[in-house]
Structure formats: C-alpha cells, structure tokens
Image: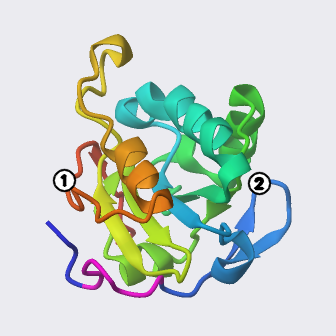
C-alpha cells in the first residue's frame, strides 16, 4: 500500500508550488507544528467533491492543535480543463477552502510522492515523516454512514503520541491525470 517512493517513516518530499491565492508554498512553509496533511486533489473528481466538506471539517477540527492541511492538484489541465489553475481558484472560493490549494503544473510533486489518486492522503508527523497514507474514511458516498475515520483516527493517535493503529489504507478515487 505504501508508495514506491514513500514508505511509512519517509521524509516529506520538497516542493514549491503556487497556491490559488497567488503565493508560493514550500513544504516547510505549510508544515503544521504537530502534523501536516497533504491531499492530492482536483476539481472534477466525484470522490474529491464528496470529501471536500469533510476535508474542511478536518482542518477546522485540528488546526488549533497544530495540524495543517494542504491540497495539491497535479492533473493535466489540457485534457481536464475543470482542473485548470483558473478553475481551481473558482472552486476554492466557492467551497471556501480553509487550507492552501496548490497547483503542481509539471506534476513533479505527484511523482515525488508517487501519488496515484485523488483524493490521496499523506499524513506527516512533526518531523515531516510519513505516519499515515491512504484514504480519509470508509464511505466516500455517504458521510453519515462512515464507520472508520482513518485520517482523523491517525491524527488523534499521532497527537496523543500513540502508534498509529492503521498506518495505511488503499487509496480510492479518480486516478491522477498524467500529461502525455
């Protein structure tokens, strides 16, 4: 389940990407004091759309505890114009994102993380080491029927200094749309 590039305990890959707010974000700039959540995301994927409110809720719930969420869109905007930088700006404003939404134009960050899906979650500890990789929870379609909140549970365990009981789950969602 871990990616070829990132195993549990691996250090977060470096990046410097432009956000929808016009600022550039490096991995050390977006780092949370206690944990950092990187979500490979996009606009058009129905899985991402189903999870958007949950991602916002996770940021709201944990930001006061030193956890920072960042979303990265690496999709080919030529074949998928809904994922263009301009559309990202519109989506972030429409949904009132409370986290940075970054454009990985050359797809180098997706390759460095070896990300394959949207949404795909990478949770890093205070030392920027991978602590959890996978999906947000066990029911993308019906929020009210979620039984296992994998990401939230991993964050809680990390913040409490516990060993993460489920460090990996398989990612579900749309595949990242690679450029030719």
Quarter of the image with the N terminus in it: bottom left
Q: For the residue carrying disc 2, how many other residues have a C-alpha within 10 Å: few (<14), some (14-19), or many (20+)?
A: many
Camera-side residue: 46 or 151?
151
Q: Which residue is painted at 46% across and 70% down in the image?
A: 124
86 on left or right of 124: right
Locate the C terminus by quadrant: bottom left
Residue positioned 38% across, 47% down in the render: 151
Give the magenta part as a residue range: 5-12
Q: Secondary structure at mark 2?
A: loop
Residue 40 appears left or right of 47? right
Numbered mark located on residue 169 in the image: 1
Q: Nearer the viewer, mark 2 or mark 1?
A: 1
Q: Is residue 75 visible?
A: no
What residue sits 35% from the left and 42% below the top? Answer: 136
Quadrant of res 168: bottom left
The vertical placement of 166 against 32, above or below, is: above
Query: In this orientation, which residue lies closer to the viewer: 89 or 136?
Result: 136
- The residue nearer to you, when weighing 85 against 114, is 114
Residue nearest the viewer, comparing 33 with 169: 33
Q: CA distance from mark 2 to mark 1?
A: 29 Å
Q: Is residue 150 left or right of residue 101?
A: left
Which structural element holds mark 1?
A: loop
Q: Main secondary structure of the magenta part?
A: loop
Q: Report whether residue 23 is seen.
A: yes
Tags 2 and 1 touching, CB below 8 Å: no
Q: Which residue is mark 2?
A: 20
Residue 159 picture location, percent across and down: 50, 59
Mark 1 residue crowding within 10 angstroms, few (<14) / some (14–19) / many (20+): some
Percent of width and height locating residue 89: 75, 44
Residue most toward the right? 22
Residue 65: x %, y % from top left:
66, 52
Colouring mode (rainbow / by chain / secondary structure / one colour): rainbow
């Amino acid at each position: 389940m871990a990616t070829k590039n990132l195993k549990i305990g691996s250090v977060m890959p470096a990046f410097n990407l432009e956000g929808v707010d016009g600022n550039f974000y490096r991995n050390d700039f977006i780092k949370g004091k206690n944990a950092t959540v990187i979500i490979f995301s996009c606009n058009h994927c129905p899985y991402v759309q189903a999870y958007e409110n949950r991602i916002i809720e996770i940021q709201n719930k944990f930001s006061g505890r030193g956890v920072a969420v960042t979303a990265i869109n690496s999709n080919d905007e030529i074949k998928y114009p809904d994922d263009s930088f301009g559309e990202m700006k519109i989506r972030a404003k429409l949904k009132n994102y409370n986290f940075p939404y970054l454009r990985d134009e050359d797809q180098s960050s997706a390759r460095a993380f070896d990300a394959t899906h949207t949404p795909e979650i990478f949770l890093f500890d205070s030392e920027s080491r991978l602590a959890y990789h996978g999906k947000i929870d066990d029911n993308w379609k019906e929020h009210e029927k979620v039984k296992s909140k994998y990401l939230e549970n991993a964050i809680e365990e990390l913040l409490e200094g516990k060993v993460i009981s489920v460090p990996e789950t398989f990612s579900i969602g749309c595949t990242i749309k690679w450029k030719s």
